[in-house]
Amino acid sequence: MLDRPLFTSTAVVKPEWIDYNGHMNMGYYLVAFDHIATDSYFDFLDIGITHLQTRNHSTFTLGSNIDFAHEVVAGDALRFTTQLVDYDSKRLHYFHTMYHADKGYVAATNECLTMYIDMATRRGAGFTEAQMRRFQEQLDLGKNVGVPAGFGRNLGIRR
């Protein structure tokens, strides 16, 4: 599989995430992407909750797209990969893919843009040189995998 070198996190679809159609409600896809994939990835990058508590810097999401490919149901095991696709001195652009862990299919994708924030001023802040080196390592890793399917897509009705 091409996605093995990417950062990976896992979860199980919770019963409370299921809607009246018997599958995961669309709002919980964002919950799963945010609380599982993003939080785990940001902890890995050392910009997660511990960073907030020790440095008083965090991230705010500027935009997010989700594409739903296949349904998942309560009890399904999920595997997420995260790929950094771009960054600058204050922002990260990354892409999550949610897989059904047992069957291997892509259930959904999530593309996000986030900004680094100084919580004292609640304004954008610059990443440190050490952070930028870590991001470059992740960007280089992603280049070995290639651009994720669905990256940068426009939402609209095809005619």
Image: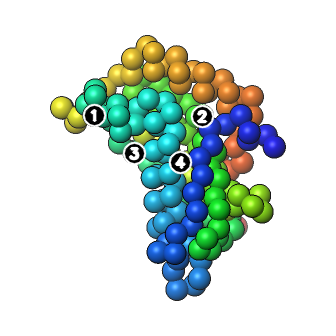
Amino acid type for the residue under numbered disc 3: Thr
Q: Is residue 159 above or below residue 134?
A: below
The CA distance from mark 4 to mark 1 is: 20 Å
**In this rendering, position of residue 55 left or right of residue 74:** left
Query: In terms of secondary structure, where does tag 2 sit?
Result: strand
Quick one: 22 or 136, which is closer to the camera?
22
Amino acid type for the residue under numbered disc 1: Gln
Q: Mark 2 sits on what residue?
A: 85
Amino acid type for the residue under numbered disc 2: Val
The CA distance from mark 1 to mark 3 is: 19 Å
Q: Which is nearer the N-term, disc 2 or disc 4?
A: 4
Q: Is residue 116 above or below residue 106?
A: above
Q: Mark 3 sits on what residue?
A: 61
Query: In terms of secondary structure, where does tag 1 sit?
Result: helix
Query: In terms of secondary structure, where does tag 3 sit?
Result: strand
The residue at the point 28 percent across, 28 percent down is 54
**In this rendering, position of residue 112 left or right of residue 100:** left
Q: Mark 4 sits on what residue?
A: 37
Q: Which is nearer the N-term, disc 4 or disc 1?
A: 4
Q: Residue 52, image x and y in percent?
A: 30, 34
Does any portion of residue 117 appear in the rendered image?
no
Farthest residue in the top direction? Answer: 129
Does any portion of residue 17 appear in the rendered image?
yes
Q: Which is nearer the N-term, disc 3 or disc 2?
A: 3
Query: In terms of secondary structure, where does tag 4 sit?
Result: helix
